[in-house]
Structures are given as structure tokens and as C-alpha cells.
Amino acid sequence: MKLVLDACVLYPTVMREVLLGAAKAGFFAPVWSARILEEWARAAARLNPAQKVQARGEIALARAAFPQAEAPPAPGLEARLWLPDPSDIHVLAVAVASSADGIVTLNARDFPRGLLAEDGLQRYDPDGVLMDFWQADPDTIATVGAAVLAQARALSGEPWEIRPLLKKARLPRLGKALAG
């Protein structure tokens, strides 16, 4: 399965790390564009200008880990597409051009399921798709979760537990599943 990762699921860090961990485990092939990655860097800079440098480093690591993930939209494709928010059309164009199966986004309002279906695409919320992966292979997703938890503890110096960490990262159902 090929899934376009919208910028809103690439930044924040914990959500991205769980999604990319699932991709590394073979649940899906991630897809993004240079513009999506740039939106990630700009979102980081809005919170703290120093984080833009960190985001650029994380983007370089993501590109290195998934060298086939970056896909440009086909020329002229954006002109024939429509979404409620014109600034999101580039995400749809990348999905269509790369023959993706869907788009993982938190932005349900601007990616209506009916419009996506016209191009053979599904919209996935990150918690829902990760729960699907967990139901298919709980042990592998638990391993991904444990790695993200260890990284969060190491980077923050805080004694995080999986459920509150994933709840804060807007992955509450996965957090509950992994804590249980």
C-alpha cells in the first residue's frame, strides 16, 4: 500500500516517528513531495525558528531512509483537481501522480472522502490507519511503539509512558492499545 503523508502528520515528531516506523516495518510505502517536506520545515519554524534547522536534518534523514518516497506531481495535474482548500491540491496531485492508495492527514475537512474517491483514493487519519496496522500485526506495531517511546524518553529526559505520549501525539486509540 502506498500512502501520501500530509505535512500535518510529518510534524509533530512522535506521530511522524510512529508512521515512519510502521513504514520501515513494511506496512506501507510512504510518499511525499518536496513541497510537503517544505511545509513540515515551515511548521517547525513557526513554533521556534531554531527548530527549522532541526526539521531540515529530520527531513534529510527521512529522505535517506525512504529514497523512493519523494514524488513530484505530474505537470498540469493540479489544474484539473479541486479541493475545498486550494492550498492542499498539491497533496492530492502527488497522490494521483504516484498512484497512491490514500492520503494520511488530520485534515478531514479539506480532504473529503467523496472527492478523493473520484481519483481512487482513501483518506486515512493517522490513529485509524495505525490501529489497522496494529490489528494486523500487534507485535510489530508494539515494537515500533517501544522504539518511539525509548527515543522520546532519551530526547526529553522525561519518564514517558506509551499511552500519554501517544495521546499527546493525537494517537489516543493506538496509545490505549499499546498500553493494554
Image (cartoon, helix red, strand yellow):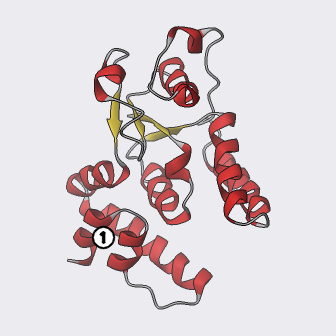
Q: Which of the pair 144/118 is nearer the observer?
A: 118
Q: Look at the picture and state if 163 lies above or below 138.
A: below
Q: x and y percent of residue 41 in the render?
A: 70, 51
User: Would you say 165 lies left or right of 142 here?
Assistant: right
- Tell me if mark 1 has few (under 14), some (14-19) or many (20+) residues whose alpha carbon lies within 10 angstroms of its own: many
Q: Residue at x 67, y 64 (%)?
A: 47
Q: Residue at x 58, y 90 (%)?
A: 157
Q: Look at the picture and state if 141 lies above or below 78.
A: below
Count of residue discs: 1
Q: Look at the picture and state if 27 lies above or below 21.
A: above
Q: Quadrant of residue 111?
A: top left
Q: Which of the pair 144/169 is nearer the observer?
A: 169
Q: Residue at x 49, y 25 (%)?
A: 92
Q: Quadrant of residue 140?
A: bottom left
Q: x and y percent of residue 144 in the render?
A: 41, 65
User: Would you say 108 lies left or right of 160 here?
Assistant: left
Q: Which of the pair 66/170 is nearer the observer?
A: 170
Q: Quadrant location of the N terminus?
A: top left
Q: Quadrant location of the C terminus?
A: bottom left
Q: Which residue is mark 1?
A: 175
Q: Residue at x 53, y 78 (%)?
A: 152
Q: Look at the picture and state if 7 lies above or below 51.
A: above
Q: x and y percent of residue 138 in the render?
A: 25, 62
Q: x and y percent of residue 169 in the render?
A: 43, 66
Q: Which of the pair 63/123 is nearer the observer?
A: 123
Task: State the SS at label 1.
Answer: helix
| Residue type (three-letter) at the residue carrying disc 1 | Gly
User: Would you say 164 lies left or right of 177 here?
Assistant: right
